[in-house]
Image (cartoon, rainbow, N blue to C red):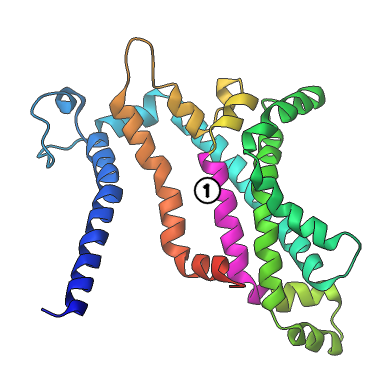
């Protein structure tokens, strides 16, 4: 048995243990969501269940406000993604192509903001949105999410535009294209991995946010999914079947995005290294 074989075997063992810790909670969530309520707390509690049912999913979609929470989350996440992509792309392009006073300070400040926990913005945003009448609104929550995710996305797009060859843009200029047209038709396709990385980061942050949605949205009809899931926990009972069924549905979009776009995601975050 060679040392190389031992190292590979140990690496495989550690990866296997890590995969178990990652996959088992997801497996238990899925099996609990598909287990009939009558059998959910019936001992023994086998790892492999033999009977499955859509009872929890049907009740979730028909007897709760889950679809309202889902609609709110989709609207807020879509708004946050659109604003992030447009603003981060334009700001990243400006940082990489223009020289102006305070450029380095602005670029550094985009990361300095992450030295402080985002929850520090909760009270100022609450007071500001209350004054402007933007509490219990999509626009207020979207802007709150953008304020958290935009700085890192600007940094990502800045780093990406720095490695996109200027010759591509100059070739478009010589053919008569304006700066904006060169950006849209030449640079954006080349920067697509960075744009996808920024979009996924903005979506995941908005989709999973609880604190800002809980503080800014006090009307149950405006709750997003993370806050709406908390309504399934009551003083007299915890509806584990509904919680696991909703958690299963909530986790699917993020998993699907990362799985389908992982190639672009890795390229986007690795750029500039």
Side (left or right) of 244 relative to 267 = left
Q: Is residue 235 magenta?
A: no
The residue tagged 1 is 204
Q: Is residue 128 above or below residue 273?
A: above
Circle 1: element type: helix
- Asked whether the viewer can see residue 85, the reply is no
Please report the bounds of the magenta region as a residue range: 188-208
Q: Indicate the quadrant where residue 73 lies.
A: top right
Q: Front-most of 117 and 144?
A: 117
- Residue situated furthest front in the rendering: 3
Q: Residue at x 12, y 42 (%)?
A: 48
**Which one is nearer the viewer's eye here, 67 or 175?**
175
Q: Quadrant of the C terminus?
A: bottom right
**In front: 52, or 148?**
148
Q: Can you give x and y, in whole percent of width and height, for residue 205 in the image?
A: 56, 45
Q: How busy is the neighbourhood of tag 1: few (under 14 within 10 Å), some, or many (20 plus)?
A: some
In-image side of 2 versus 135 (left or right): left
Q: Is residue 227 at all visible to an observer of this figure?
A: yes
Q: Residue furthest top?
A: 236
Q: Residue at x 33, y 28 (%)?
A: 242
Q: Quadrant of residue 244?
A: top left
At 84% from the left and 81% from the top, the residue drawn is: 177
Q: Position of residue 148 (x, y in %)?
A: 66, 44
User: Residue 255, image x and y in percent?
Assistant: 41, 53
Q: Quadrant of the N terminus?
A: bottom left
Could you tell me how many numbered marks the image carries? 1
Residue visible at 78% across and 82% down in the picture: 169
Q: What type of secondary structure mainly makes up the magenta span?
A: helix
Q: Position of residue 81 (x, y in %)?
A: 63, 51
């Amino acid at each position: 048995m060679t040392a190389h074989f031992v190292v590979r075997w140990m690496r495989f063992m550690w990866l296997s243990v890590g995969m178990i810790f990652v996959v088992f909670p997801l497996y238990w969530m899925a099996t609990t969501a598909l287990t009939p309520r009558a059998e959910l707390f019936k001992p023994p509690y086998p790892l492999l269940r033999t009977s499955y049912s859509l009872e929890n999913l049907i009740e979730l979609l028909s007897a709760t406000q889950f679809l309202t929470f889902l609609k709110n989350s989709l609207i807020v996440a879509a708004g946050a993604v659109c604003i992030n992509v447009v603003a981060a792309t334009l700001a990243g392009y400006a940082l990489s192509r223009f020289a102006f006073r305070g450029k380095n300070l602005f670029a550094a400040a985009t990361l300095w903001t992450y030295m402080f926990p985002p929850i520090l913005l909760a009270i100022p945003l609450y007071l500001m949105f209350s004054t402007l009448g933007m509490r219990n609104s999509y626009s207020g929550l979207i802007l709150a999410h953008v304020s958290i995710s935009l700085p890192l996305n600007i940094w990502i797009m800045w780093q990406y535009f720095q490695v996109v060859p200027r010759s591509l843009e100059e070739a478009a200029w010589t053919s008569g294209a304006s700066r904006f047209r060169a950006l849209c038709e030449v640079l954006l396709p080349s920067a697509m991995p960075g744009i996808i990385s920024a979009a996924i980061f903005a979506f995941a942050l908005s989709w999973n946010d609880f604190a800002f949605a809980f503080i800014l949205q006090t009307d149950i009809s405006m709750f997003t999914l993370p806050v709406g899931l908390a309504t399934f926990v009551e003083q007299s009972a915890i509806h584990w079947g509904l919680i696991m069924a909703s958690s299963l549905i909530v986790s699917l979009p993020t998993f699907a995005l990362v799985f389908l776009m992982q190639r672009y995601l890795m390229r986007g975050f690795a750029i500039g290294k």
